Amino acid sequence: MSDGDLRAFYLRYIDQLNAHEFDAMDEFIADRPTLNGEPATRDDVIAVQKADVDAVPDLHWELEELLFDGDRLAARLVNTGTPAKEWLGVAPTGASFEIVEYAIYQVRDGRFVHMTALHDAGELLRQLTR
């Protein structure tokens, strides 16, 4: 995929995430990707995404920066939301969060085969428990 194709692919992926359209993930995620360095299935990835949105119904990903290196891409996103259920061991308090996420992907045959995401969990918990 060219950089332009990867950009369009990733923007469609983020649009589907923000629409909480998890049935569309077959288009984006390989059958057996790695997730944060561990072997997984597409269903595993979707289960994580669904659990996050179940706890944070307004969870939103805002793309700030996108870089390409061959079949790999790196994204800097801002994640926002207000938990409505217990999430990450924290009961909902009405507090919202805004944190930066860094994500690295490898795309093969038009789908993610490696997916890694990192965010400041300490900052997230600080915002939710203040």
Image: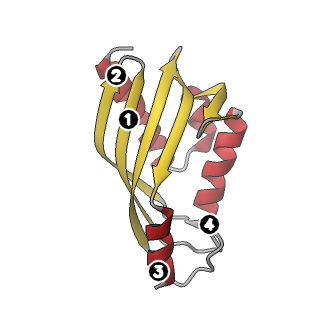
Location of residue 67 by image quarter: top left
Mark identifier at residue 55: 4
Q: Amino acid at mark 2?
A: Asp
Residue 75 falls left or right of residue 82: left
Q: Earlier in the sequence, mark 3 or mark 1?
A: 1
Residue 79 falls left or right of residue 17: left
Q: Is residue 65 above or below residue 119?
A: above
Most foreground residue, 6 or 58: 6
Instruction: For marks 4 and 3, give the CA distance.
Output: 13 Å
Around disc 4, counting alpha carbons within 10 Å, would you say few (fewer than 14), some (14 to 19), or many (20 or more)? some
Q: Earlier in the sequence, mark 1 or mark 2?
A: 2
Q: Which residue lies under the disc numbered 3?
A: 95
Most foreground residue, 96 or 8: 96
Residue shown at 40% from the left, 46% from the top: 102
Q: Which residue lies under the disc numbered 2?
A: 69
Q: Position of residue 105 (x, y in %)?
A: 47, 31
Q: Which residue lies under the disc numbered 1?
A: 74
Q: Amino acid at mark 3?
A: Ala
Q: Amino acid at mark 4?
A: Ala
Which structural element holds mark 3? loop
